[in-house]
Amino acid sequence: MPRPDHTPVASRGHALEFNGSTSVHVPSLQALGEVLNSFELEFWVLSSYTRPSTLFHAGANDALFALSLNEPMPGGGPVPEDAVDSGWCTMHFTLRDDQQRCVSGFVCYPVLDGQWHHVQWCVEDASANRMHACMDGMQLSITLCDEGGPCDWPQLTEGLQIGAAVSKLANVCTSHFIGSLSDVALWSSSPRRHAIARWPLSHAVGPTALDVVGGHDAAVTRGHWDIAGFPASAGLFNGLNAYVDLGCVGDFGAYLRRCGVEFWIRPRTGQGPCCIFDSIDGDQGGLRLSLRPGAGGTPALLALSVQDSHQRLLTAEAPCPIDNGQWRHVCWRVEDSEQRRVSLEVDGEWIEVSISPTSSPSPPTEFKAWARSAVLGR
């Protein structure tokens, strides 16, 4: 595959830009599920985004196929700051079957320098833990993290997500990628090498990314930007006695380690501190979203609190100009509460978040189903 030059790529639109809300969903890839023991993933990537993000994610039941950037190194150590400044990052590949047998590996390479890079990740034999990675034609050393390779593959009926991970429990996309991807291809390596699917990924495709090989066309979603203007209907809360009792949505409480909350909001001018969503249960933990309007020209403060069943609290706060009487689209993502990974997106833009406490809890967090009602607007 010829290396794309940045200027022609941009002029002919032969790349798809991912802005932090964009993702590409392939509805079904059963053909990939049949060859996961020996296959190859190939693509071009351009990015300088240094937050943890997911390039590819496919899951069915407990099985998983994923490729992510900027994950912590084995043993918990981050990539050194001087390496990050020069574009170095980790690339983490995970393959797990429905019996929880896993093969995963890390490579470190200067992918995030704002230039195009060609990536090939080849699984030679997953059951024997044999795989290799090539970046720009150079084979890299892989740090393998598991010993027992997977071998029992389900059908990937839930498809493949490109540019984000999918939380089945919360039904949201998380860990969005920011950058550009081009010429994504999946190859079967056995008994002979042949293409399963190939998506050139182009701005010209509109809402559909065509598979030029196997007919696995994908839907391009641009998150907030796919929603025109503002909601067609809304509930009015007066700050006194108007609220919505959602009843006991108890099952959601068990999923707070990785979850998401997405909503539209338009605070009135002069709005005081308020609770947007509350489900904190003293015994079982819970989730709370709140807003504290700014004063003296300072922006409003959005806050998210997650509490586990041991009353250990994680709080994330972010200043945001949200209290000006305009509709705003808000998306909180708890990517991993135990690892203190929380992100906030307002109107499709990432907002810097302050998280406390900064250290992970010991013992690990534990979430249970809620025993009390959840409330909107109080």
Image (cartoon, rainbow, N blue to C red):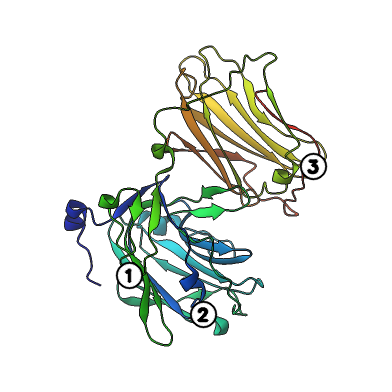
Contact (Cβ within 8 Å) of mark 3 with mark 2: no
Q: Secondary structure at mark 1?
A: loop
Whether 276 is drawn above or below 139: the answer is above
Q: Which residue is mark 2?
A: 37
- The count of marks equals 3
Q: Please identify the quarter of the rendering in which residue 308 is found.
A: top right
Q: Amino acid at mark 3?
A: Gln
Q: Please identify the quarter of the rendering in which residue 25 is found.
A: bottom left
Whether 211 is drawn above or below 233: the answer is below
Name the foreground residue: 99 vs 227: 227
Q: Amino acid at mark 1?
A: Val
Distance from label 3 to label 2 (Cα)?
41 Å
Residue 252: x %, y % from top left: 69, 44
Name the foreground residue: 48 vs 131: 131
Between disc 3 and disc 2, whose residue precedes?
2
Relative placement, left or right, of 333 versus 203 is right
Residue 213's tag is: 1
Between disc 1 and disc 3, whose residue precedes?
1
Distance from label 2 to label 1 (Cα)?
21 Å
Which-is-in-front pick, marks 2 and 1? Answer: 1
Contact (Cβ within 8 Å) of mark 2 with mark 1: no
Q: Which residue is mark 3?
A: 284
Q: Secondary structure at mark 2?
A: loop
Which-is-in-front pick, marks 1 and 3? Answer: 1
- Please identify the quadrant where the N terminus is shown: bottom left
